[in-house]
Amino acid sequence: MDTIVAVATSPGRSAIGIIRLSGPQSLEILRGLIRDQLFTPEPKRLSLKQIVRETGEPLDSALVCYFEVPHSFTGEEMVELSCHGSPVILRRVLDLAQRLGARLAEPGEFTLRACKNGKVNLSQAEAIRDLINARTDAAAVQAARQLKGELSVALQPAKEKLIQIIVRLESALEFVEDDLPRIQAEQIEKEIAEVAVIVEGLAVTFTTGRALREGLKVTIVGRPNVGKSCLFNRLVGLNRAIVTEIAGTTRDSISESISLRGIPIVLTDTAGIRVAKDKIEGIGVERTYQAMADSDVLVVVVDGSTRLASEDLAIVTQAMGGRHVVAINKCDLVNEPGLEDQLDQSLKVVHLSALTGEGLEPLTAAILEPFAAADSETVGLLITDSRHYDLLRRTLASLENSVELFSQSASEEIVLVGLHSALQFLGEITGETTTDEILAEIFSTFCIGK
Amino acid sequence: MVFDEAFDVIVIGGGHAGCEAASAAGRLGAETALVTLNLDLIGQMSCNPAIGGIAKGHLVREIDALGGIMGRVADRTGIQFRLLNRSRGPAVQSPRAQTDRALYRTEMRKMLEHTGNLNLRQGMVVDLLVERGKILGVEMQDGRRIAARAVIIAAGTFLNGLVHTGQRTYTAGRAGEPASIELAESLKRLGLPVGRLKTGTPPRLDGRTIDWSAFQPQEADERPIPFSFSTDKIEQPQIKCYVGYTTPDLHDTIRENLNQSPLYSGQIKGIGPRYCPSIEDKVVKFAEKERHQLFLEPEGHDTNEVYLNGFSTSLPAGLQQDLVRMIPGLEDARIIRPGYAIEYDFVDPRELGPDLQCQRIAGLFHAGQVNGTTGYEEAACQGLLAGINAAALVKGRPPLRLRREESYIGVLVDDLIKQGVDEPYRIFTSRAECRLALRHDNADQRLRRYGRELGLVGDSDWERFNKRQDCIATAKAWLRQARLRKADAGYLAAVDVVGSPLGDSINLEDLAKRPRVTIDTIQRLLPLGIREHITTGELEAALADNLYAGYIRAQDAVIRRLKHHDSTPIPAGLDFRTLNGLSHEMVERLERTRPQTFGEARAIPGLTAAALSTLYVAANLQM
């Protein structure tokens, strides 16, 4: 096994830049870097050392830390050097380390080594990736929870229940001559349903979980000149979009990434929807429709100072199908009486003024409703990974299939096809269950042996 | 080296593995010697006098399809045939038969004596002659040396056998027969990893001392289904077995006397099978159970001996007599032979390749209990495979390897050589991923061709096979096109069976899949011209294919999902030794082949799914 080296902090200038070494030569290379062959550091203690150029001149003074096998992130011998964060210095240290026998690490290679040495499992490695990429607090909290193995823990009851069901059905098939308790059909159906409830409960969190990881796509739509861009600027906190009193100022959709109470949001301002006056505006309106189809939440802006036009109502009707908020703008002006009666009772409505900022709080709350408590640690475990979501959906489909066959009194070996698939899908998240483990469970549950 | 005799193949042991091995090797044209301690005990059933059972019956049918002999002998000597799991789907139905123990031996011996190129030799092998990693022959206790190009060890529980009854122990291969101590030592000298297992057997009773009226009779099937595809009819008169139960008092007495049990005193070191526990184990591990089921199984037509199935024990012989008499109906029963436990050596089967040949000693094959398995059927199928492959080695032909997807034999061998064993290995249907496709009714369809190509399936059997396949195909074609219409004669009867409306007409393929629709329902709907030509067995096979077609496709899809990484490359230079979670053997197997993709890795014999997923994780993170 060779020794790898890489800069652990992000590229660019900073106060401190960290370089990591992992592999059996790490300490030896450190001794080379500081030109002190007798240096014998105490593990996990910082020491201030001079890194010396090949010419003998000092390169940088750095805080160095040594980790023993297996008490390091990768499980190998490791060294971390906290240098001054100049890209030039870091580059020179890397060069020196390579000359002393290290090899530049491939992307993800430190985590790979941790995985190989049993320091983390696949799902935890995925969590590390998410933790590094987390763009907001809430996303980081979720990744950290997965790193602790919470998803596996949350699925454990489902898996155990499923194994118990499989054990009973398999025993009935395999040990027909043994004196086993009869299969209680209703009991089995009930238990499969209980497994499905646990799995479903996790699967449904994916919409929220994905938004947390990838950002919630919020799109502002409406008729021209109702104050969309003004609201956009207000939420972004910059004069990002051009605002004029001329209807149709916004020609193209523009997007900004923002964070609302810790939740990543991709906010899109769109061209107002009307019959286009020219080709450019036509394309802009087309893009608006695309953005609408692609978004998680639609904010429909209407002008609260006049009666709603048929275009307003058409847009509102379109938005009703998905998650939406109707923002009745210009509450700083005189409000049109009876305007709300024009809107369907089931619509979610807020009053605000994009100009003064009044009413932005209720709007934010409405957008973030699914994350009601997401900015704190009290939120439940969320499925953030589409691989996990896909596996949970497959598990559910298999379970449903089995229940249906069971209710049609299909023979056990047929019902078991779906149950075994379900267990396999769960196993791809929580770890494989082998036939031997199922047999072991059978022999400890029932007295087998004609 | 000077030899007294020379053969192509030597088979050590005349049990169920040895008989199949010797028969196959001889018939494949290899000059073969079957060396056994006692020629009169060839084909002896050391434990219960029965062949088949769930999954085991599948094995017997597969043996028969390949051209083995166990099914034929069982058909000639079976005295109570039953198809198990009759109320369930065809994939988990399995034939089982009580056999006449003495008759089975006689028939097996007769069969072997009529086999060309096969020579029976009585004697004890004490050493394996090996030079430069290659087998040369064996040395006998009397000093004779016999040369052979291949040697098959099928020595059962005889390898270093140690019998326990109570605190008494004595070396033996079976009660009353000597153990093979030196042969076991020679395996260790060759450096093979040897472990210790344990099995047990119940007492046999004098049938004249049993109050049969206290037990519930269990009848044979009215229409016995033979094991062999070549058997037309079961000729043996069929007998009854009887079911009874133990009592709480009996359990208490056993628990009070556990100090006399070699199992609980620590005297027995070997690991026994969990699915075949002794009565001591049953009352200790399942203390809450008020009764345990027992079967009284007559050992044959011409004997009073009765096998007390479910009462395996190694308690002292005197105590066994007292315990048996506590069973309702056995108050006056007398034990003819006491039960006992036996410990024996086995060799880690991970030493073997998929042809059952030892990887470090060319020409040495292992079959049966030496590989850590238990059961006559498990032994026989390994014997057959070892016999076929020993002959292939001698004749310079490619070995026969059976895949998991095509046979239970493939599942068993693959499990053994990949996972090894930590208790006596028994086959179960749940061990087969493709359970719905591996049925007893289609064993011929899956394996007959191999038997024919090898030369183990004769012309008349081959003709029979082809005719059967044609009839199954006809039946399937008819099921596919025929519709049952409202106006048809059988329509109302069919609605009655299904219990719900069937519409104006229904396709027979669909009707046959409905719950409660049986083969009788369909058979009655067959037009006379077809009904005359198709046997019940052939229709059953056609219906089973039809019933499972959709699920087999779904199962295939799941397996394909596992295969969809096949083209993913494995990073060049990945050091397998550094992958945590890979066992030493897995690393060795990987380093030998150096696979470049996951498809190649999957094809490596002996590589487990767990090893593949470890590899996958490693490769994935690196990319």
Image: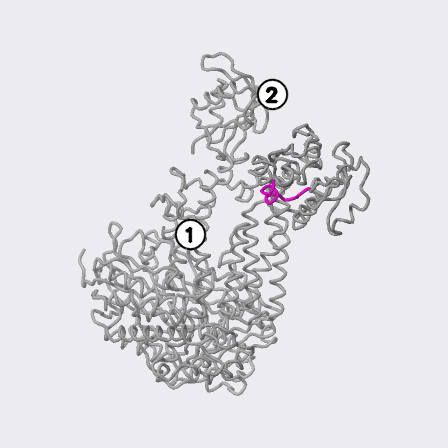
Closest to the observer, B403 or A292: A292
Q: Residue at x 35, y 77 (%)?
A: B74
Relative to A401, residue B331 above or below: below
Protein chain holding label 1? B
Q: Is residue B321 left or right of residue A250?
A: left
- Highlighted magenta segment, given as a residue range: A288-299
Q: Is residue B425 left or right of residue A394?
A: left
Q: Amino acid at mark 1?
A: Lys
Protein chain holding label 2? A
| The C terminus of chain B - image quarter | top left
| The N terminus of chain B - image quarter | bottom left
Q: Is residue B310 visible?
A: no
Label 2 crowd (10 A; few <14 / some 14-19 / many >=20): few
Q: Residue at x 56, y 54 (%)?
A: A393
Find disc 2 in the rendering and name its residue: A15
Answer with the quarter of the image where residue A211 lies: top right
Closest to the observer, B309 or A246: A246
Q: CA distance from mark 2 to mark 1?
A: 49 Å
Q: Is residue B555 left or right of residue A278?
A: left
Find disc 1 in the rendering and name its residue: B563
Answer with the quarter of the image where residue B107 lies: bottom left
Residue A267: x, y in percent?
Answer: 64, 37
